[in-house]
Image: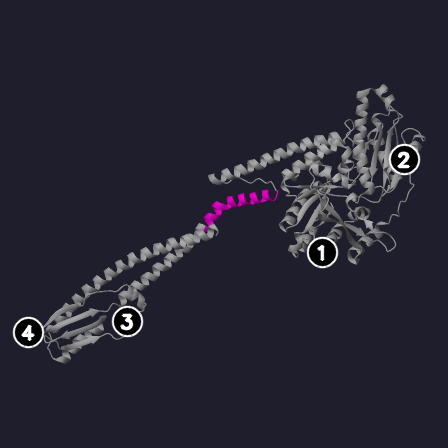
Amino acid sequence: MTLTKQLWIAVALVMALAFGCSIVVSVLSARDYLQNALQVKNIDNATSLALSLSQLDKDPVTMELQVAAQFDAGHYRFIRVVSPTGEVLVEKKFTGEQTLAPRWFIQLIPLRAEPGRAQVTDGWKQYGTLTLASHDIYAYQSLWNGTLKLLAWFVFFSVVAGLVGTWLIRWILRPLGDVVGQADAIAQRQFLTIAQPRTPELRKVVQAMNDMVARLKTMLAEESSRLEALRKKVTTDEVTGLASREYFLSHLQEILHGEEFARVGSLVLVQLSDLTQLNKQLGHTRVNTLLQGLGQALRNSGEGRPGQSAGRLKGAEFAVVCPTFVSATEAAMDIHRNLTDAWLPAWLHEAPELFHVAAVRYQRGQTLSDLLLHADEALTRAQSQGPNNWYASEEGDAHPVLPTDQWRTLLTEAVSGGRLSLVFYPVVGGDGKAPIHEEGLIRLQADDASPPLRAGDFMPMAAHLNLTAPIDLKVVQLAIEHLRQSQGDIAVNLSADTIADFSFRRQLTELLAAYPDICKRLLFEVPEYGVFRHFDAFRELARALKRLGCRVGIEYFGQRFAQGERLADLGLDYIKIHPSYVHGIADNPGNQEFLRGLCTLAHTLGISVIAVGVEARTDLRLLADIGFDGATGPGLRQ
């Protein structure tokens, strides 16, 4: 029972008790007063009337008229004159309605006023005895009206007291509601702080919980910083700040075989002409400065281009993978322009023959060794064209590029015409047996003759045309239809640009609200770069989805771990680690150490950790030992 209901019951009981006591005291006091007044009135009226009758002639008519006149002038129950022998000489009685007060009230509070008596004389002889009793109907009516008024006032003040008490309780307990909300948020893995209330008792509770949240966030920030430093150590080249060879090749392997990016892209190699000679000519410190500038220029070239990443393959050889460039020529020109504009001018007078750029096209399914061999051949061609020059090879299946208008028509008709579908891949538990859910990946059937396009083949163009929202909404509808006809749970992906669309968030919540049972089996994932790109929008969406009963996670997690402490108040259910950390995990102790710390930190926040891109079931035991709760990848789909 709520405190408000308890307050109303308490007010009702107290006021009822007060009313009972008050009514007893007031009614009994009034009854005694009225009873005495009636008693005195009876005596006075009897004496006065007896005196009048004694002075009159004693004929019956005169006596009758005098008694009748007195009876009609006052309010009497009866007036009676009895002779000394007991004969009733004159008698008048009231025979009308007695009172408006209920009979039970009259019986409960009787008025016992004695009738007035006086002697009527005839000269010196006794004529008779006069007895009269004033009517008590008005006394009862007065008592009844007073009781009703008292009851009305008590009811009024009871309501007022209840309303005021309710308001006071809500005002006093408002901070308690905040405390409950904070506790619920913490239970949902949303670590929030609230303002401290004025009430001392609640202030201590709030302060303790706020301190706990602050300590947790501090611990999370410190651990995030430590893990970020460890991540950089195992995945980043110390001098240039670019990806290390192992990490870059792992990332490139995921692009060649994963779902995230288009089937065709470009790989660019950048090679310094003679690093040994540069060290002799410029000195070690100056060469490090040169390399740092090169790394910064290559990183800047990828800003705003999802998936573009640069790494250091050898001492003087660097690589940039460009998933958004179908044309190797355009990729080579872009990297060359960035270097000649932002980096080369500062060193041209000291090292006029500084670098070469080569670019080749890759396609999904191509082996890593074949791609690197092809790139080395292109680099040899670039070196033959002179210093600070570039060469691009457009060999390979480029796949015809559709004009923008045709893409718009294709994507629009795909949403309305049933050309979108989902394929499902298992996400298994740590033991590799029971699936914890399935991941629904989108496919687009562009035409009947071609195989379905993966998300990476058309979603970048959908983002360019602002069509990701209707596509994502269609994906959710397809997932709901599948869940209505099957068992288990399904995870679907939302695009980075979609979550920033307020209209989409509203339509999504309205759609899900119609399927409360389905929501418990539906999981939503957003890529990490989209989460931090639209963090406030993602937080709002995550909380809305959690209220509906859905689960929320982040996929491809680990590229922006320096901002990981911002995830403390999102209430995430799980994260899926970027495949670049998982490829070759058995032979990479550095990644193992980093991922072990990441899993420990995530588990502290109640977040499950899932490995993505697992290539063999033999890796499952190691992943479970590291701390992963689940895994998915091509090696687990057979």
Query: How many neighbours does mark 4 have within 10 angstroms: few (below 14), some (14-19), or many (20 or more)?
Result: few
- The kind of secondary structure the magenta stretch mainly shows is helix
| Viewer-nearest of discs 2 and 3 | 2
Residue drawn at x 32%, y 61% as measured from the top left: 147
Q: Which mark is residue 486?
A: 1
Q: What are the residue bounds of the magenta stretch? A: 166-189
Amino acid marked by disc 2:
Leu
Amino acid marked by disc 3:
Gln
| Viewer-nearest of discs 4 and 1 | 1
| Viewer-nearest of discs 1 and 3 | 1
Work out how far the residue at label 4 is from the one at label 1, CA to CA, in angstroms: 118 Å
Amino acid marked by disc 4:
Gly
Label whose residue precedes the other's in the sequence (2 or 1) = 2
Contact? badges 3 and 4 (CB < 8 Å):
no
Contact? badges 2 and 1 (CB < 8 Å):
no
Work out how far the residue at label 2 is from the one at label 4, CA to CA, in angstroms: 156 Å
Q: Nearer the viewer, residue 130 or 319?
A: 319
Where residue 595 sits, quadrant-wise, is top right
Residue on which the image places disc 3: 98
Label whose residue precedes the other's in the sequence (2 or 4) = 4
Reply yes or no: does residue 195 show up in magenta: no
Residue on which the image places disc 2: 373
Label whose residue precedes the other's in the sequence (3 or 4) = 3
Query: How many neighbours does mark 2 have within 10 angstroms: few (below 14), some (14-19), or many (20 or more)?
Result: few
Contact? badges 2 and 4 (CB < 8 Å):
no
| Viewer-nearest of discs 2 and 1 | 1
Label whose residue precedes the other's in the sequence (4 or 1) = 4
Where residue 151 sits, quadrant-wise, is bottom left
Q: Secondary structure at mark 4?
A: loop
